[in-house]
């Protein structure tokens, strides 16, 4: 099982990671607002993550750390 | 007594730069300074240095910016229209507090102008020469020996104060031949911990930069820079006084104009007129003190220039307009003759009663 | 086991780019390559003027901020003075293909041993979305409000194609960062461009087709689609010059 860590305060809520995830693990947190004023990304089905790192590949702000 | 060799001004300057430890030269051909580039093209490859003919003056000054960022001594040379192109780089060098030596062998302007000697870039050199608040140390040689000496001095001052030194010469200084001694005691350049040559993973990264988007910070940088300029004004003013002990007519002149004026002063003295000269060697910082002091005893100043009257403004400022300052000038590549300067002295003597 | 994390060569400073701007991806790719080649301690980066003007805050290696368009000249100076340093420039389209065209062309012609990362997003971002030298025919920008009229302002500059006509440069490739596969290819190209410098091969330029969601007026997702639909057809991806590979083939 993979572990996802986000630097949530640096997230700009662009959603590129959400779109690219083949397992639909991620979503933008509609009920949260970070320091920058964005809805940051969160993992909603972390247990389904296959650690393909597509999300991190497309993240422009390098906020995702993936461990297995 | 060191051995003297006969050299052209431009070549003496180039060799002095090499002696001072300059191993990187970037330039673009323009009359009348091309000998500097030609000399560097011959010498640099033989001593493991860089000679590069850049695609433009703009590229050349930015190559200088790059080398200077690494902490090495570096220079470029050009003539008036080319210096205008370098203006952008001069401002960035100042904004990033980088040392460099820039040579301007002036020719007549504005625009394409001509290729004969001129001093019409005085304003450009001494008042900044590009956008933003900044100064360059401006050195004005009046002999081939000084072309060399001031080159060495220019590098030392540039490193000491982290700013650009400019040699403001003219076509005559560049082209004429005189015996010159090139023996110097070159001090090692100061440490440059700010240089960008790689962190070696042993320190925080260095950043060479002139951008600061926070107004309070940018203001602070400007004020700090001007404190350094104050130090330059306090420590580095250079000038020559010639027959000033009892002078009643004082000529202000630099470069070729000063040499012509010396002849005129000799003749004036022979005719019983007490003429003398203050020759600024640093045009910035301008030697204000000797002029101010002279204004107490001198009856009239004559600014002899190869321009429509540029340094005259600094003479008036330095003397606080206490006595008349008149202009004796030729432009467009013309040089005032000793006779013309003598006439100006005689005229001044008549008006001011300095006999 | 760490599968993915921020490369060391990137600082912790949050980047100022707009949401979804792919500058950040390219920054990361450059940093990953610096890490993988183990060259951070001897790398000197040159930042441009434009959106990536503050790139000097984002890379952990020594950095120099150049005047608009002059990065290749500054890089030339650094590399000539310190040939053991690895020197790269990071420039946008206005910087590299408009105001700095001469510096670009001539550093390529000299085969200056530097690495150039060229971000082509067909617009001036920092100043608020004006027409770039690479803006597409018909593209609406702040300074081409009726669409880029090629009869008035000419055609876009295709940098890789143009430079490929020179004998000088070692390596020219155009890549994109609009999907995972393209990002991976972009990294390969960037790595090659750095490795070429280490091997002393000379001028290597990677043109990266990038997005500008804000000034294109598109969502980050649609901006990536626009790259596929509009940008890549006009700016085909691929290797435009690879002198060493060409030599290998003829052997």
Image (spheres, helix red, strand yellow):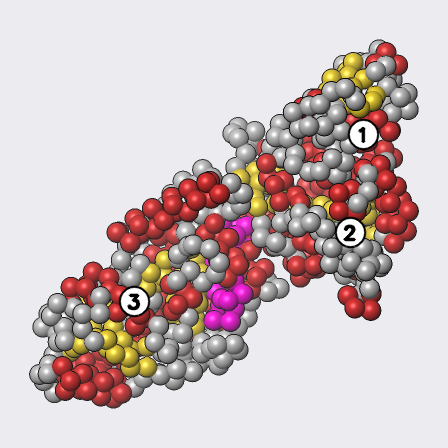
Q: Residue at x 47, y 71 (%)?
A: B80
The residues tagged by marks 3 and 2 sit, at their Cα atoms, a distance apart of 50 Å
Give the camera-side residue of B58 and A35.
A35
Residue matched to label 3: B314
Give the camera-side residue of C126 and B237.
C126
Judge whether A62 appears above or below B337 on screen: above
Residue C209 visible (yes or no): yes
Q: Position of residue C86 (x, y in %)?
A: 63, 41
Q: Quadrant of residue B250?
A: bottom left
Q: Residue at x 24, y 64 (%)?
A: B318
Judge whether B109 appears above or below C119 on screen: below
Q: Position of residue B61 (x, y in %)?
A: 53, 58
Residue C168 visible (yes or no): no
- The magenta-colored residue range is B63-86
Within 10 Å of disc 2 (Cα), the crowding (few <14, some 14-19, many 20+) is: many
Magenta span has B64? Answer: yes
Secondary element at image label 2: loop
Query: Which chain does tag 2 point to?
Result: C
Q: Which mark is residue A15?
A: 1
Q: Is residue C99 left or right of residue C213?
A: left
Q: Position of residue B201 (x, y in %)?
A: 56, 29
Residue matched to label 2: C122
Judge whether B199 appears above or below B37 on screen: above
Q: Is the residue at mark 3 from the same chain as the one at mark 2?
A: no
Give the camera-side residue of B345 and C189.
B345
Residue that extends furthest to the front in the rendered view of this protein: A31
Within 10 Å of disc 1 (Cα), the crowding (few <14, some 14-19, many 20+) is: many
Magenta span has B66? Answer: yes
């Amino acid at each position: 099982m993979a572990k996802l860590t986000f630097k949530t305060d640096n997230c700009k809520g662009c959603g590129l990671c959400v779109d690219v995830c083949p397992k639909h693990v991620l979503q933008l947190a509609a009920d949260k607002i970070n320091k920058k004023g964005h809805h940051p990304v969160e993992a909603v089905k972390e247990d389904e993550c296959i650690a393909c790192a597509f999300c991190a590949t497309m993240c422009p702000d390098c906020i995702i750390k993936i461990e297995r | 007594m060191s051995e003297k060799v006969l050299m052209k001004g431009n070549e003496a300057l180039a060799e002095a730069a090499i002696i001072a430890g300059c191993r990187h030269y970037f330039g673009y051909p323009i009359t009348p300074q091309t000998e500097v580039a030609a000399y560097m093209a011959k010498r640099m490859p033989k001593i493991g240095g860089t000679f590069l003919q850049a695609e433009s003056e703009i590229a050349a000054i930015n190559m200088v910016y790059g080398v200077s960022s690494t902490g090495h001594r570096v220079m470029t040379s050009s003539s008036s229209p080319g210096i205008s192109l370098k203006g952008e780089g001069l401002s960035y060098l100042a904004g990033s507090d980088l040392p460099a030596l820039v040579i301007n062998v002036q020719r007549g302007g504005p625009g394409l102008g001509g290729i004969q000697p001129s001093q019409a870039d005085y304003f450009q050199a001494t008042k900044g020469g590009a956008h933003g608040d900044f100064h360059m140390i401006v050195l004005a040689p009046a002999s081939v020996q000084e072309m060399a000496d001031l080159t060495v001095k220019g590098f030392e001052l540039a490193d000491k104060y982290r700013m650009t030194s400019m040699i403001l010469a003219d076509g005559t200084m560049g082209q004429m031949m005189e015996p010159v001694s090139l023996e110097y005691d070159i001090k090692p350049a100061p440490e440059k911990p700010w240089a960008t040559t790689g962190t070696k993973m042993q320190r925080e990264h260095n950043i060479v930069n002139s951008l600061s988007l926070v107004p309070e910070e940018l203001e602070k940088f400007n004020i700090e820079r001007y404190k350094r300029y104050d130090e330059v004004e306090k420590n580095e003013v250079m000038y020559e006084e010639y027959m000033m002990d009892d002078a009643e007519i004082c000529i202000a002149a630099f470069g070729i104009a000063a040499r012509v004026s010396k002849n005129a002063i000799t003749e004036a003295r022979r005719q019983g007129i007490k003429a003398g000269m203050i020759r600024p060697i640093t045009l910035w910082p301008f030697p204000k003190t000797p002029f101010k002091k002279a204004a107490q005893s001198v009856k009239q100043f004559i600014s002899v220039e190869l321009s429509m009257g540029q340094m005259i403004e600094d003479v008036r400022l330095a003397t606080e307009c206490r006595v008349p300052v008149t202009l004796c000038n030729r432009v467009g590549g013309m040089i005032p003759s000793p006779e013309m300067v003598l006439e100006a002295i005689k005229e001044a003597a008549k008006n001011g009663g300095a006999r | 086991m760490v599968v993915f994390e921020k490369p060391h060569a990137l600082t912790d400073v949050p980047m100022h780019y707009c949401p979804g701007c792919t500058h950040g991806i390219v920054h990361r790719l450059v940093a990953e390559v610096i890490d993988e080649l183990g060259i951070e301690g001897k790398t000197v980066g040159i930042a441009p003027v434009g959106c990536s003007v503050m790139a000097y805050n984002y890379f952990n290696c020594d950095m120099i901020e150049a005047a608009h368009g002059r990065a290749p000249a500054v890089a030339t100076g650094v590399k000539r003075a310190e040939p053991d340093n690895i020197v790269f420039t990071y420039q946008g389209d206005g910087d590299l293909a408009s105001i700095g065209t001469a510096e670009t062309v001539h550093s390529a012609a000299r085969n200056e041993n530097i690495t150039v990362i060229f971000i082509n997003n067909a617009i001036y971002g920092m100043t608020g979305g004006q027409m770039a030298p690479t803006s597409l025919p018909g593209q609406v920008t702040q300074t081409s409000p009726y669409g880029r009229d090629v009869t008035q302002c000419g055609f876009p500059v295709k940098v890789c194609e143009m430079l490929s006509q020179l004998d000088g440069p070692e390596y020219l490739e155009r890549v994109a960062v609009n999907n995972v596969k393209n990002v991976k290819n972009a990294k390969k190209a960037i790595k090659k461009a750095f490795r070429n410098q280490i091997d002393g091969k000379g001028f290597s330029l990677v043109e990266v087709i990038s997005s500008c969601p804000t000034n294109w007026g598109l969502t980050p997702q649609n901006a990536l689609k626009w790259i596929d639909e509009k940008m890549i057809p006009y700016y085909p991806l691929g290797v435009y010059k690879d002198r060493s590979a060409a030599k290998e083939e003829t052997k």
